Structures are given as structure tokens and as C-alpha cells.
Amino acid sequence: MTAARIQLIRKREHISQGVLATVLNMSSESVQKWEQGKTKPQGAALRLLNIIDKKGITAVI
């Protein structure tokens, strides 16, 4: 999952970094670092991002 892909998913779903962080049970700082390419999502957060990418945010909330 690339930084650009995470940002694209978030913008497509019309949600802020904070909202995405809440849905993934992560911190806003984590989402910000992902989008800057400083770190990459792992584990459950990565799986949830893949679900959101394929099925939309409503699939996980």
C-alpha cells in the first residue's frame, strides 16, 4: 500500500486523516506518516485499508 494510494482512498471516501485513523483504531499521526511515506501500515490496519479500497468505508463501520 503506497502513500499515494492511502491518500487517494481517503480523498475518494471524503474523510479526514482523523476520521480514517478512528476507523482503523490508529492515531492521526500514523495516518499522516503513511501518507508522507515515512512508514507503512501493517497488520490489521493494512487489511482494513484493503477492504476500504475494494468495498468502501461503509464495509468497515
Image (cartoon, grey):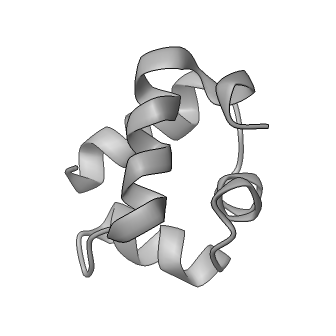
Residue at image location 46% in from the left, 62% down from the top: 44
Please identify the quadrant where the C terminus is shown: top right
Quadrant of residue 57 within the rendered picture: top right
Q: Nearer the viewer, residue 61 or 7?
A: 61
Q: Is residue 52 above or below residue 26?
A: above
Q: Nearest the camera: 48 or 39?
A: 48
Q: Residue 32 vs residue 6: left or right?
A: right
Residue 18 x/y as whole percent: 74, 63
Residue drawn at (43%, 28%), measured in percent from left and top?
53
- Name the residue at 27% across, 55% down: 3
Q: Position of residue 50 (x, y in %)?
A: 38, 37
Give the percent coordinates (x, y) of residue 29. Answer: 57, 82
Q: Is residue 34 above or below residue 23?
A: below
Camera-side residue: 43 or 31? 43
* Position of residue 11 measured from the top left corner of the image (x, y, whole percent): 55, 32
Residue drawn 26% across the image and 71% down it = 40
The total of numbered circles placed on residues is 0
Residue 53 lies, with reference to residue 50, above or below; the image says: above
- In the image, taking residue 46 as reference, residue 20 lies left or right, namely right
